[in-house]
Amino acid sequence: MYRDQVYTKALRCSVIVALLLIQQVVSAQNLMQYVQPLAGTASATTISAIKHSEAGGTETNANTIPAVTLPFAMTQWTAQTRQTENKCVPPYFYKDSLLTGFRGSHWLSGSCTQDYGSFTVMPVVGTLKTVAKEYAVPFSHKDETTSPAYYKVKAGTVTTEITSTLRCGLLQFTMQQDDSLYVLVTPNSDYAKGFVKVDAAKGEIWGYNPAHRIYQGWGEPTGFSGWFYIKIEKRFTKRGTFAGATVFATDSVLQKKDAGAFAGFKLKKGEQLLLRIGTSFSSLAAAKKNLTAEVGTKSFDAIRAASKQQWEKALAQVQVQTNTEKDKRVFYTAMYHSMQHPRLFSDADGTYPAFAGNAQLKKMNGNYYDDFSMWDIYRAQLPLFEILNPNMTNDFVRSLILKGEQGGWLPIFPCWNSYTAAMIGDHVTAFIASAYNKGIRNYNVASAYELMRKNAFETPNSFAEYKNGMGRRALTSYLNYGFIPMEDSVQEAFHKKEQVSRTLEYAFDDYALSVVAKGLNKAEDHQQLQQRSLNYKNVFDPSVGMMRGRYSNGNWFASFNADKRESYITEGTPRQYTFYVPQDVPGLARLMGGTKQFENALDSLFIKNEYWHGNEPGHQIPFLYNYTSSPYKTQREVRKILTEEYSDGPGGLSGNDDAGQMSAWYVFAAMGFYPVDPVSNNYLLTSSLFDKVTIRLQGNKFFELSTHKTSTTALYIQQVKWNGKQYNRNFITYSIIMQGGKLELWLTDQATVWGSSAASRPTGLSN
C-alpha cells in the first residue's frame, strides 16, 4: 500500500509538472491567428445543408458577421454591406462587393432574427453624399484584414481600422490622398424613429435607435434604445444633418427616414481621424460613462493590444495540439463564434433597462445579459461555458431570474430584452436546471424554482399576457392529454402547430425541472414532473416506429412521411425528431423494440443521408450509438460530420450558426465528448480530432485529453485510461472534468468493441 501511495503521489506530481509546462506553452501561443471571422458569411455548400434546407429559405446561410468584439460583449463592430435591420438580413454578406459603412451592431450572431438599436458610420471622401447608392464604395476581400480584435479594409481612398472593448469601439480612418472627409452617422431605424445630433463645438455626435420587438408583439417598442456617443478630437470644418438626399443646416434630426448627421474635415494624405465611440442600452449619459470607463484617452493601438490580449486569454482556455493547421483554424473560429452571446446588456456601473418593455432602468451587482437564443444554445453552447466559466454562468442565470421577476413569467426565448415565444420548448428551465445540477448556484435558487414551476404548471389568466409570449404555448392541452393534439394549432406563437416537437421538448423540460425539485426535496413536484417526462411515449406510433401527430381521441394523424417535413414537426422530419428524447434514450430504444432495433433505426437515418446537422434537435443523434452495443459508430459518424459539415472558408458552416450552437457542437465533438443531456452532467465520449486537448479550469486546474494513434487516420477507440487507470464507461461526467486530470484514448483504424457493454453506457429515466 505504501508503494502504491508513493507511486500515486509521483504520478500526480508528474501530471502537475506537465500541465504547468502546457500552461506556459498556451500563454505563448498566438491562437487568434487561427480565427477566421469571415467563416459563415457565405452560404453553406455542405451536402446536408443543400438537401434539408427549405427551398428559397435562409437556412443555408450561417448568418455570422466578421465581428470585432470581445467575448459576450454588448456591441459588435462590423463592415456593412446591407443597410437594413430586417429579419434574416445580417449586416455583412461575403458575396457583396459594396461597403456602405461600419456598424455598431446588435445582430444575433448566426441567427435568422434581426439587428436592433444599431448605427452606422461611413467615411465619404471628396464631396458630401448622403444616399447609400451614391456613397457606397467597392471593396475586395483581399484588401480586408479580419480578426476578433481588429478589422482593416482599404476601400476607395480611405483605409478603415476597427478595434473594441466590451461596450465601446474605436474607428480610425487614414487618408490615401489630400482631400475632404465627411463622416456620416446614421441610426439604422427601419421605422424612421431614430435621432442623431452633431455638436461641432464639443466634437461630438450622438443619438439613439429605438429597438422594436419581433415575433410576439412584432413592431412594438421594446422600451429601450441603442444609444451611441462619438467623440472626435479634430476640429470640424463642416457639420449638418440629412434625411436621404435632403441636407439640413440644423444640428439634429428626429424620426425621419434614412436620417443621419455628418461632420466634415480637411485632411492630408496619411493623416488619421480617430473616433472613440461609447454604446449603451440605457442612456446617452451611460454611453459617455462607458466610453470613459473603458477607453478614456487611450490610443487605438493600446485598445487593440488589450483586446488581443483578452481574446488570447479566452481562446487559450482550450488548447489543441495537431499537425493539421486547418483543424486549428476551424476549431478556434468555432470558439470565437461560441463567445458572441448571450449579450452583455448592462453598463459599466451595472445599469440596464428593465425586462419586458416598461422603460425603467435597473441596477445590479455583476453583469446583466440578454439575447438568449435558448432553443439552440441550451444544448451545447451554454454547457460549454458551464465548464469554462461557471462564474459567468451564474450571471446568466441571475439575468434570467431577473427577467422572470420583472416580467412576471420566466421567458421562453428572451431576445432584445423582451418576451418572444419565438421557438418551442421551455429551455430556460433546462439551462437553469443544468447549472443547478452542476452545483452552479450563486443565485436565488428559490426564486428560480418558483418561476420555472410557474411555467410548467400555470397558464396566464389574461389572454393578453399569453399572447404577449408569457408562459408555455399550448400547456393546457399538454397537461390534459399528456401530449399536444393536432386540434391545438398553437396560434399564439411564431412557430404554429409543431405539436409533436413541442410535446417532446416539454417532456425534456419537465425532466429538467424534476431534477431541481428532487434536489430541493419537493417530492410531489418531482413525482409529477418525472411522470410527465415520459410523455414522449404518447406521440410514438409503434406501427411506423417513429413520432407522429395525434388527435385528442388517440387516433394518429393520417399524413405520415418519415423523411419529409410535417406540420407537427419543427424544422425537420419525423425520422429526425424521433431521436429527441435525451432524458430517456434507453426508454426510446424499448419503444422501438430494443437496443438492436434502436441501433438499426439510427443506421437507417445515416444510410439514407437523412441526418441534418443544420437542425439543432438532431445534434445529439450521432452520439446515441453510445447507448447501443456499437459505440464505434458514434466515432465514425461524428468524425464524418466534423469533416464534411465544417470547413475553414467563408461557407464553412452548415446552416445558421444560431448564436454559436453549431460552433459549440464542433468544439465539443472535436475535443471528444458531448452533452447529449446537459442536465444529467454526462458527456458521451467519441474519438478526439486532436492529439491533445488541454482545458484550463477555474482554480488553475487542467483537464487534459490525449490520444495515442496506431496511424494518422485512426479514429476508433480501443481503450481509455483516466489518470493512468483503465476506464470502461463510454461517457464522462462534469465532476471528472472539473476536478482536472488526464484522460487518455488509444485509437486504431479498425472498429472495436470498446464501450459496448450495457454496463458501459449512460442510463436514462427508464433504467
Image: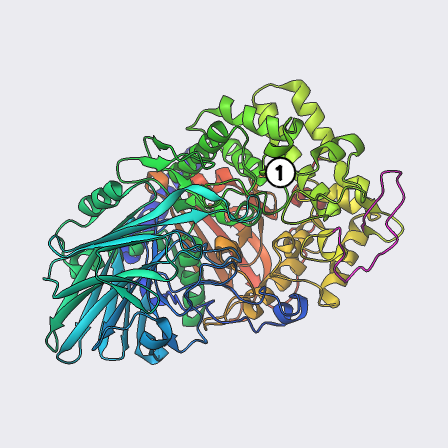
Place of residue 497 in the rendered image (x, y in percent of width and height, measured from the top left): 73, 48
Q: Does the magenta run of residues contain 560?
A: yes
Q: Is residue 722 left or right of residue 15?
A: right
Q: Residue at x 68, y 19 (%)?
A: 524
Q: How is the image coloured?
A: rainbow
Q: Does the magenta run of residues contain 504?
A: no
Circle 1 SS class: helix
Q: Range of the magenta residues?
A: 547-568
Determine whether 535 is above or below 190 in the image: above
* Badge 1 density bin: few <14, some 14–19, many ≥20, Cα 10 Å: some
- Comparing 458 with 747, the one in front is 458
Place of residue 678 in the rendered image (x, y in percent of width and height, measured from the top left): 57, 42
Determine whether 545 is above or below 58 in the image: above
What secondary structure characterizes most of the magenta part?
Answer: loop
- The number of numbered discs placed on residues in the rendered structure image is 1
Place of residue 299 in the rendered image (x, y in percent of width and height, measured from the top left): 14, 58
Image quadrant containing the C terminus: top right
Q: Quadrant of residue 691?
A: bottom left
Q: Is residue 577 left or right of residue 359?
A: right
- Comparing 484 with 602, the one in front is 484
Q: Residue 494, can we see it?
A: yes
Q: Which residue is mark 1?
A: 467
Q: Residue 1, can we see it?
A: no
Place of residue 92 in the rendered image (x, y in percent of width and height, measured from the top left): 42, 67
Q: Is residue 563 left or right of residue 641?
A: right
Q: Residue at x 34, y 79 (%)?
A: 139
Q: Label 1 is placed on what type of residue?
A: Lys
